[in-house]
Amino acid sequence: MIEKLKIKKITYLFNIIALIILVGTVAIYTVFQDTSGFIQDTNIKANIGYIDNITTNIANRIKDVSSANIYETLKKNKKLKDELESSLELFTTNKYRYVYLLDRPDKSKDTYRFLLDGATNIDDKSEFGEEYTPLNMKEWNKVCQEKKPIYFKHTDVKSLWLTYIKPIIIDGEVKAVIVIDFSLSDHKKIIKSLNMLDKTFEIAIVFAVFILFVILFFSYIDNKRSKDLEDKNIQIQNFNKTLQEKIDQEVEKNRQKDQQLFQQSRLAQMGEMIGMIAHQWRQPLTAISATSGAINMKAQLNKLNKETAIELSDKISSYAQHLSSTIDDFREFFKPNKEKKEITYNELVKSVLSIIEESIKNKNITLVKELNSDTIFYTYPNEIKQVILNLIKNAEDVLLENKVKDPTITITTKDNILSVSDNGGGVPKDIIKKIFDPYFSTKTKKDGTGLGLYMSKTIIEEHCGGNLSVSNITTVNEDSKSLDGAVFTIKLGVNND
């Protein structure tokens, strides 16, 4: 978010800079336009002022030496004419190329005649009295009418020229006009330079507009990209929220499913446990029945004395206590206790064997106990008991199903490891990776649910934070013969509290 704000600030800064450059360029260009016009006007006025001074001096000179009829005066006095023409020639330069004096003898005609010509080249000099028809007669006539000097521009093929006409007024009438044609080449150079600057400013303005456009374009793209990212982020957040809800729903479904599977597994174990209890109860009940029959018979034969009655009743009491103890073990085993307790592997194994050991021995299965762990664990005792019971029952089923000679179940504890192994032939390699999958069972013909090992792994790894694994082993018996079997290993974390 902070990085995004920095990028926006930089973008706004570039926009402001580009706008300032554009506005500044336009302002400078506007000032330049005004200055350019001022320079051109000043240059023209400077030239006109200079020419006006020259023509004023020439006009005053002619007035001083001539009468009202300037033509007649000059015609009669050739020396004066040559002197005045020499004065005009002094003003003739490359810039002020044509300087001449003309009058208009007949105002009804649009013609003038030459009186003086300041041309320095003899070939360019006009004859005295030679007629001349101006191209811009309207401008020439305006001088005679308004009796004021004028100037006007006209162009030829080569360059720009300006013509200045000043009237010579004697007795209130325009008797002649002084005309000077001068080149505006210097003015043209100034205009050319100003035009180049003008184009430079125009290019600068176009460039500033282009830069502003580019920055605005990229700002638009960046804003659009930012908006798209925000929209996508919102979509992703909504998607994540929906996905999380779906995940929570699926987790809840899986939890409920695991609870159902766990309940099914517990019911199956309860059925097996009831069978074990019934088996354990059979002998005490038979003994109780036999003892009560002996009491009955002795009583009928009048041979039931005090000592015999006490002895037989103590036996019945002992058998009843054994039955009660079996019920307590069963109830404790399936007690729904979700509190963690401190316990050892040895205590867990002994608790399980108190219920199942008699049943195993009655099936002629050798039970080997190698209990060497005093490590204390902080865990759920009843759940681990169910796992141990399930592993022992699975080993029992395999041994009975395969009709193994000298069937043996070995329970070993050491440090934080508990293992239950058998010599029933081991787990086939093609199914050993599937053995913990739900509903996978090798006892389908005997009503196997396929939930025992799945729930055992779930209890050890998810509830108790341990690990449950299986592998095949090879053992050697007393006859030095190799016997294959399976070993299930439980590994729990050590209590460090």
Image: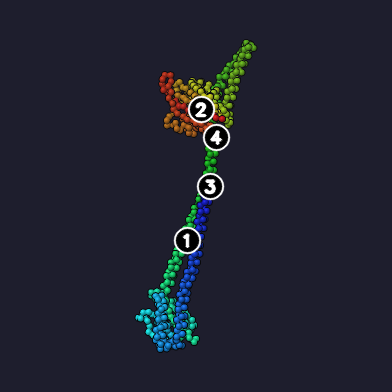
- Residue 199, percent across and down? 44, 66
The residue that mark 4 highlights is 259
Q: Earlier in the sequence, mark 4 or mark 1?
A: 1
Which tag is nearer the camera, tag 4 or tag 3? 3
Q: Which residue occupies 61% across, 16% down?
A: 314
Camera-side residue of 259 and 19: 19
Look at the image and tell me in which quarter the C terminus lies.
Answer: top right
The residue that mark 2 highlights is 416
Q: Earlier in the sequence, mark 1 or mark 2?
A: 1
Task: Name the residue furthest left.
Answer: 123
Label 1 secondary element: helix
* Distance of label 3 from label 1 (alpha carbons): 44 Å
The residue that mark 3 highlights is 238
Q: Does residue 477 appear in the picture of this structure?
A: yes
The residue that mark 1 highlights is 208
Q: Earlier in the sequence, mark 2 or mark 3?
A: 3
Q: Earlier in the sequence, mark 4 or mark 3?
A: 3
Q: Which residue occupies 62% across, 10% down?
A: 303
User: Is there CB contact under 8 Å for labels 2 and 3?
Assistant: no
Label 2 secondary element: loop
User: Is there CB contact under 8 Å for labels 2 and 4?
Assistant: no
